[in-house]
Image (cartoon, rainbow, N blue to C red):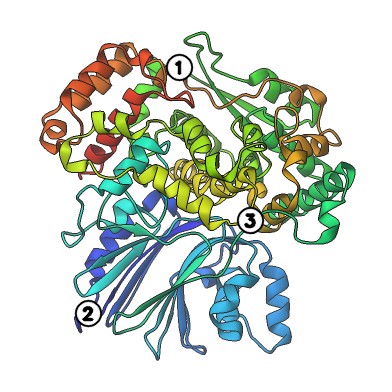
Amino acid sequence: MCGIVGEIRFDGRPASAALVQEMARAMQTRGPDSEGLFVQNALAVGHRRLKIIDHSEAAQQPMIDAELGLGIVYNGAIYNYPELRAELEAKGHRFFSHGDTEVILKAYRQWGEACVERFNGMFAFALWERDSGKLFLARDRLGIKPLYLAEVPGGLRFGSSLPAVARGEAVDRSIDPVALHHYMSFHAVVPPPHTILKGVRKLPPGHTLTVLPDGRMEQRRYWQLTMGPREEADLTRGEDEWVERVLESLRASVRRRLVADTPVGVLLSGGVDSSLVVGLLSEAGQTGLKTFSVGFESAGGEAGDEFKYSDLIAERFATDHTRIRVDSRERLLPNLDDCIRAMSEPMVSHDNIGFYLLSEEVSKHVRVVQSGQGADEIFAGYHWYPPLLEATDAEAAEAYARVFADRDHADYAAAVEDAYLGEDHSRAFVRRHFEALNGARPVDKALHLDTTVMLTDDPVKRVDNMTMAWGLEARVPFLDHELVELAARIPAEHKVAGDGKHVLKQAARKVVPAGVIDRPKGYFPVPALKYLDGPVLDRVRDTLDSARSRERGLFRRDYVERLLQAPSDHITPLGGSKLWQVALLESWLQVHGF
């Protein structure tokens, strides 16, 4: 787990070592252990390293294989690298290190750009050929690892962080109206290739980008999730068989994510997903497992923690458990700017600060954790899936958007200044996505959208950003692509039954106590950022009343004043604060100097 940056020039000028070093410094927390720089004519790359696999200097990056004429900077973890290494050694390849980075180089030499199809893991890397000057960029199937791109006059920049890639005057930092519409309307999810800045794009998950020395580029999709049965037997398999298949696949996924030269802990929310991860790790023989939970004070009639459930799991599996209780007045407000600074893109979910403060504490104990993100999206845990079982194709996209979207287009138009008005980009995006899945059921279309887009650009990005702010690597076993593909095959009825995630809950009953399964659905509550008042509201008001905010002119003043007067009257369908959404974007832009 690390941070990568780089620049390649197409105009005959040398790449800027100074710029790349500056970009790398902007991501120091992603790789606090060491740094590296490689410069050769039109290419300059930088790396920040977090030592998880192979702590030796032989695994230092940028890694150069002079014999093969290849180099790489890489962020992530290839969990099946031992198996791939053995296969490559059998084909005659010789290794000088013991980690997964060199395996990528040898795999590229052996299988070319198709090597990515053999990797099980999370990754974003830039690999170059010394002799041809070709650059090859790749991102993992579910987008667990970020990869941002900025086309500038005469060149291309790339990196693990948007603020890092946006360094330098050549990048257009103006607001992208399409991205702004998604941010305000699609629950702050900005689908690739867009980001909130016009000049920065992101490589979509499951894609590669080949860049030639003359500036020609070819983007290729190497993985696509197929929804619905794959074979005739899928239609007749009973619930019990699906349960066993899910449990078997999840066991394999959890075991894979133990590959590390350092202890692995768990972020334990107390929900069924993270509890199941703990149970399976215990089942796999892990003892003295370190687990961590965070909670806030109650507000607005909502409990601020779920400690009674996380305590139950900690006791059942005899984990070394740490509770972290956060007082909003003492810790939330003083840490809010640093939390926002840790966001590679503006992310409105309240629990960012929870993950940020949790990661700070966890990083004092371990350097790798497993987390339960992704189960709700791939196993249908949200409330908008059951109604879509009976929806028609004609009404499916609108039915989904009506429940998920924070605003309709009229509300968006009332919020932003005229310069940012345009089409209803968010609903048009949902319609295009649903229409592209011709033949799939409406509920499967929603699951596909959430798994491949929403999941990547909301919860997964949130966990990556907040953990990496403290040099902590988060691994997500529910996003093992083999498990995701299996879940996509399961008939929706087996997933949405009951309160959702039915087949997963049935699998969990074989591992964890029923008390964490048969309970109301919870979330990572941070009430202080939903029911804005007191010092937090004062901070929001100062941000939106600032000269920088007024000069930027994103939001209509009458709309801002209406939100400020009664924040709790303006809550989104998914329970978020419209005022916090507006303030968070302005805060993010200011914190990063945009």
Q: Nearer the viewer, mark 3 or mark 1?
A: 3
461, 41: nearer the viewer: 461
Amino acid marked by disc 1: Asp
Question: Is 213 positioned to the left or the right of 189 in the image?
Answer: left
Dot 1: what SS? loop
- Total marks shown come to 3
The residue that disc 1 covers is 327
State the quadrant of the C terminus. top left
Q: Residue 121, located in which quarter of the rendered image?
A: bottom right
Q: Earlier in the sequence, mark 1 or mark 2?
A: 2
Question: Is 282 positioned to the left or the right of 412 in the image?
Answer: right
The residue that disc 3 covers is 439
Instruction: Bin the neighbour count of mark 1 within 10 Å (Cα to Cα): few under 14, some 14-19, many 20 and up.
Output: few
The residue that disc 2 covers is 14
Amino acid marked by disc 2: Pro
Q: CA distance from mark 3 to mark 1?
A: 50 Å
